[in-house]
Image: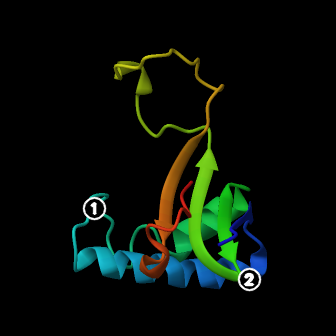
């Protein structure tokens, strides 16, 4: 299966919002490791903020959005307290946030 990763297009925003709704609803009924809250985060509104900042990406297969994520340089916390094997100065790394994959595509390598 071939996956295409691109910056989110405006026309895909509603689809990304629905993807986040689907994934957060699924998580609320299963193991919810990220502790995401359906209708709150991630959601269409958080996707809109990421899109406006130029940080929202989609993964498509056959033209269908099957994954969405945010990629930026904001660790949203103090990464200096981690026990890292390699030190990378702030501003020289990227962080993936809100990576969500539709359940039916889970385990197919979308996140790779």
* Color theme of the render: rainbow
Task: Locate residue 19, reporting x and y percent.
Answer: 51, 80
Tell me the element at label 2.
loop
Task: Locate residue 4, reporting x and y percent.
Answer: 73, 66
Q: Residue at x 43, y 17 (%)?
A: 85
Location of residue 49 with respect to 81 vertically, above or below: below
Q: Which numbered disc, 2 or 1, marks the residue that appears first in the sequence?
A: 1
Task: Locate residue 40, reporting x and y percent.
Answer: 39, 72
Judge depth for marks 2 and 1 and give the one in front.
2
Q: Could you tell me how many numbered marks the image carries?
A: 2
Left or right, 102 with respect to 30, comes to right
Pointer 2 residue: 63
Snapshot quadrant of residue 30: bottom left
Left or right, 20 with respect to 36, comes to right
**Residue 35 image label:** 1
Quarter that holds the N terminus: bottom right
Tell me the element at label 1.
loop
Out of 104 and 36, give the one closest to the viewer.
Answer: 104
Q: Residue at x 58, y 67 (%)?
A: 68
Out of 100 and 47, give the one closest to the viewer.
Answer: 100
Quarter that holds the C terminus: bottom right
Q: Residue at x 22, y 68 (%)?
A: 31
Q: Residue at x 66, y 25 (%)?
A: 92
Residue farthest to the front? 1
Location of residue 8 with respect to 79 vertically, above or below: below
Contact flag, marks 2 and 1 (Cβ < 8 Å): no
Callout 2: 10 Å neighbours few (<14), some, many (20+)? few
Snapshot quadrant of residue 110: bottom right
**Residue 45 image label:** none
Task: Locate residue 47, reporting x and y percent.
Answer: 58, 68
């Amino acid at each position: 299966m071939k996956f295409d990763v691109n910056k989110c297009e405006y026309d895909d925003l509603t689809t990304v919002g629905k993807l986040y709704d689907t994934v957060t609803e699924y998580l609320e009924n299963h193991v919810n490791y990220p502790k995401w809250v359906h209708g709150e985060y991630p959601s269409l509104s958080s996707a809109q903020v990421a899109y406006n900042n130029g940080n929202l990406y989609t993964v498509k297969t056959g033209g269908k959005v099957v994954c969405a994520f945010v990629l930026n340089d904001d660790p949203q916390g103090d990464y200096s307290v981690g026990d890292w094997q390699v030190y990378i100065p702030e501003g020289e790394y990227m962080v993936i946030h809100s990576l969500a994959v539709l359940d039916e595509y889970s385990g197919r390598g979308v996140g790779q």
